[in-house]
Image (tube, rainbow, N blue to C red):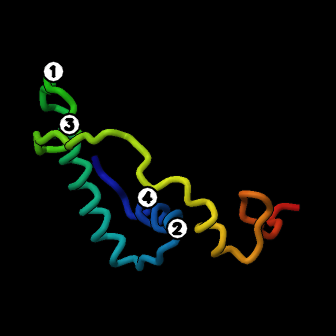
Amino acid sequence: MTVDKNAVKKIARLARIQVSDEKAELLSADLGNILNWIEQLEEVDTTGVEPLASVNEHALPWREDIVTDGNITEQVLKNSPEVAGDFFVVPKVVE
């Protein structure tokens, strides 16, 4: 796939970066090479290949989901300049 200089300039404008005409010529060749490589990857037969979340086959250790530091509401709220009941009071940000 080929990427011309105009496409590179449009991509640069959308990305809000400034690209000179000389640099656009170089980038058009580079982007063309990248797209050709991606086209080659599409030709690879991946039937029967499971999707990967990681290349490591280590399972993450699981722990029991229990609360270990609860019931400290008073300690937490004493750091706030203003409270209402068991809640922080913050300034209104939406009108």
Mark nearest the camera among 4 and 2 is 2
Circle 3 or circle 2, nearest the eye: 3
- In this rendering, the label closer to the viewer, 4 or 3: 3
Q: Position of residue 16 (x, y in %)?
A: 52, 71
Nearer to us of marks 2 and 1 is 1
Q: Are marks 4 and 3 in contact (CB under 8 Å)?
A: no
Q: Report helix, strand or loop for mark 1.
A: loop
Q: Secondary structure at mark 4?
A: helix
Q: Residues within 10 Å of mark 3 (few under 14, many from 20)?
A: few
Work out how far the residue at label 1 is from the one at label 3, CA to CA, in angstroms: 14 Å
Residue 10 or residue 44, whichever sits in front = 44
Q: Residue at x 32, y 39 (%)?
A: 64
Q: Which residue is mark 3?
A: 52
Tell me the quarter of the image containing the C terminus. Answer: bottom right
The three-letter code of the residue at mark 2 reads Arg
Q: Secondary structure at mark 3?
A: loop
Q: Nearer the viewer, residue 7 or 73?
A: 73
> Horizontal and vertical percent for residue 12?
46, 67
Q: Earlier in the sequence, mark 4 or mark 1?
A: 4
Cα separation, mark 4 vs mark 1, equals: 34 Å
Check disc 2: other Cα within 10 Å, few if <14, some if 14-19, many if 20+: few
Q: What residue is disc 4 on? A: 7
